[in-house]
Amino acid sequence: MIKDYRKTCWILLIAFFIQQTLRQMSCSTQMIRNYDVINSKISHGTSKTAKWIVTQSENCNPTSTKVAIGRLWSEYEKLRKNKSKTDGSRKFTEFLETEFAPPTLSKTVKSKLPEVTCLINSSGDATSTAISISNSLFMENQNLNQEKFTLKSELSETISNLKTLNIKSENISRKNRVLQENLVSSNKTVKRTKRREDYWKTKCTKLETTTDTTKEDYQQLIYELQADNDQQRTTITELQTALKEKDDQIAYLIEQLQEGGETRVIHLFDKKEKAFTPELHLCVYSLLEHNVPSTQIGPTIEACLKLAGKEPDRLPSPSTVANMNIQRLCLVKKQLEDELPEKINTTLHTDETSKVGIKYGGFSVRDEEDACENIVDFMTGTFPSLTGVAFHDDKIFESLTKESTYDTDVEIILRVLLPSIRKVVLHVYKDHLPNGRYESFTEELSQATKSVDKHNSYSERLFAYMDQILKSKPNISTLAIEAYTLFLMNKTSTWIMRNSENTEVLISEASKSVIDERELFSRRKAEIQRQREERQEEEFQKRAEKRRKKRMQLEKQSDDIVNYGLWKSPRECKLKLKELNRTSDKCNALKAQLRYRKNVLKQTDLDKKLYSFSKIGSNGKRHPLTHMELMSNLLKVLKSV
């Protein structure tokens, strides 16, 4: 009996311990928000975050917690991407503030209870009470957990409702502020209206209190108004008569236009002067400037006139358009004659290029004003330069000077490049280096070189435009290219517009100068061809003379070999030298052998120093080789052969 009582006590103690443990499990869980889980995952990773959640909520499965964290992260990424959409920010904030619900171990606890039940059943009837107590405690714990989760969901819903109410409250406050502002504005309007009403009331009062004018004043005013009225009637009658005459003229002109037909002819050719009008010349200049082909100028003008319901009396032919293009060149020269004498401190830039086997030269004149424009372009970054760049105390300089694994390779490359760069700098910038002409740059020289360009961008742009013309018009002449380029680059059309009062005179003079311009171009072309042929003939004579001297030199070397014989072995060389008594004869024989093998037999794959007849001494001066040194060089050549 006592033993059964002890067993019952132990069973009750175990049940009480289980109840306390379950209560601690249900009560010890702290509230973990999604925001805390996301921050922990970003800082420590998924595994450590799962361990942290398990320590905070004891009835959690670590593996299931990792899966839950993964699903939570996917939902976080989705809401973060949609944050900019409507209600996206609100949903994102609600998601971060929501409590994180980790997976529980209820199934595991249930699976372990039968073992306890089996242990208790072994004690007999006394243990059945403990089992029922533990089961009831377990059911009570389950109910508490269920109530807990229900309360949590209600709390989350209440929080979301409060946030919604807060948003609505903010909207109402915003509307109240707008209404308050409208009320203030309305009050101001009412005040202005009241002040305006008071002003007019005062006016009306003053008018009412003003004394009436006398009857005589009224009569005088009536007489003046009647006289003015009679004068106005007379003027109206005259204007009506003039208007009727104008209406008759308009009606007559309308009849004339109707008799002339629907299309109206526009006169582009002056029959009296036997030339096209200045307006047509300007139109052709503009079309050529916009790269319309000369063969399509006439159809283009006709199509544009049809669009306006008009018809030209005459159109220019392609040959006439070609002459008009040369007129543009004459206008450019006239522009340069007018503008260049006014320029101060000008500089002539020249450049050349080859296109389709023909060499073209470009000449441009710049003054101080153009140079200032280039400075502005430079300041805006259009023409980058290396001047003014700080090479010290910056990250690039430090990166270049610090040690690296490629220092050995870089040293080899620099040993090859730097001597070449030094030669180029000494040749190109010799006037700007110490002891050069421009080492001390005076203020006078600075003023004189203000218009000197710092690059060749302008000439390259000129050649690029010329290249475009050659590709679009392969058969164009050089004179036409010059007209196209100069008219565009010098902005001659703008110059013509500035001299609009002299446009007709300028075009007439240009038309008369076309023949002279073509003759001048033919003479220039013939002169260039003559000079080219003279240079070719001179170069041909130089090459012929050079070949003659070379042939004579080889003949002399062959005669020397015939005199001394061709030595084919070291033994023969030594024997032939013993036959010669004087040292000068030995030197001449050795030189003849070396010259013949170098220039006639072309045995130049050996060291070039073997064919030298002199060397640099210790004093830095060159001295002739002795006959022993010459013999040593010849023996080396013979042995190598």
Image (cartoon, rainbow, N blue to C red):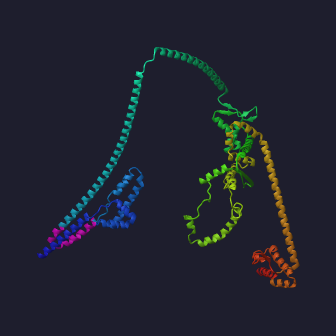
Q: Is residue 292 visible?
A: no
> Is 82 placed above or below 20 here?
above
> Is 420 placed above or below 87 here?
below
Image quarter of residue 301: top right
Image quarter of residue 39: bottom left
Locate the C terminus by quadrant.
bottom right
Q: Is residue 229 magenta?
A: no
Could you tell me residue 470's position as x and y percent? Answer: 70, 50
Q: Residue furthest left?
A: 1
Could you tell me residue 261's position as x and y percent? Answer: 66, 28
Residue range in magenta is 106-131
Residue in the picture at 63% in, 72% down = 412
Locate the N terminus by quadrant.
bottom left
Left or right of 508 in this view: 217: left
Residue in the picture at 78% in, 44% down = 517
Q: Nearer the viewer, residue 256 or 3?
A: 256
> Is 196 placed above or below 561 here?
above
Q: Nearer the viewer, residue 52 or 390?
A: 390
Q: Is residue 625 visible?
A: yes
Left or right of 342 in this view: 397: left
Could you tell me residue 192's position as x and y percent? Answer: 40, 33
Q: Is residue 113 magenta?
A: yes
Could you tell me residue 125's position as x and y percent? Answer: 14, 71
Left or right of 323 in this view: 540: right
The total of numbered circles placed on residues is 0
Residue in the picture at 38% in, 36% down = 188
